[in-house]
Amino acid sequence: MDKDVKTALQKNNEVVKKVLDIYKKDEELSVSSSGFTIDSSSYIDQINEQTQQNERVFEGYKVKNSILIKSSNSQKAGKVIDDAIKNEFNAVDFVRFSPDDKQIESAREKLLSEAVNDAKKKVNLLLENLKQKVIGVKKVYDIYEKINNPKDSDDSPIQFYG
């Protein structure tokens, strides 16, 4: 912490630049700084030697940064935190890990595939019990598209003819 806000900001900029430069070298990371705050509420209680009274003394300014890092490799999380601490970040107060677009798309594709397989099993079980069979499928809608385009919902999602 620094008693002068200008010095605190200057030191903060140097540390953040150094850490961001390290992260930007890693092609698996997408890095951006999303701002900072200056905390001026750092006081300590001290006994005044002359008056023997307890006094609040301003300790200094604390600059907190928000840095957004995205990666499809969740194994990078520990390294990201370690690199910040090794390069003069005083603390890492908050970490939230979220999947990047690549992970979201991969999970969506996997879940859709599993949903189709589950639907096939259920339909086959029903048809077997009804002693029926599917001759053809007229149309299959992507549920994701159906949710995002509700005006296109004039047909039932899957139609069977037997």
Image: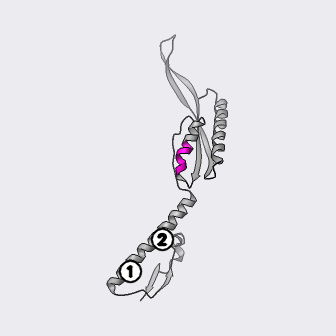
Residue at (49, 72) in percent of width and height: 143
User: At which x and y percent is residue 150?
Assistant: 52, 73
Where residue 95 sits: x, y (%)?
Answer: 51, 45
Q: Residue furthest left?
A: 129
SS majority, magenta = helix
- In this picture, residue 160 sits left or right of residue 67: left
Residue type (three-letter) at the residue carrying disc 1: Asn
Residue receiving disc 1 = 124
Quarter where residue 20 is shown: top right
**Residue at numbered disc 2:** 113
Q: Is residue 27 magenta?
A: no
Q: Residue at x 64, y 43 (%)?
A: 22
Task: Tell me the SS state at disc 2.
Answer: helix
Q: Nearer the viewer, residue 89 or 154?
A: 89
**Residue sitting nearer the eye, 147 or 136:** 136
Q: Residue at x 53, y 75 (%)?
A: 151
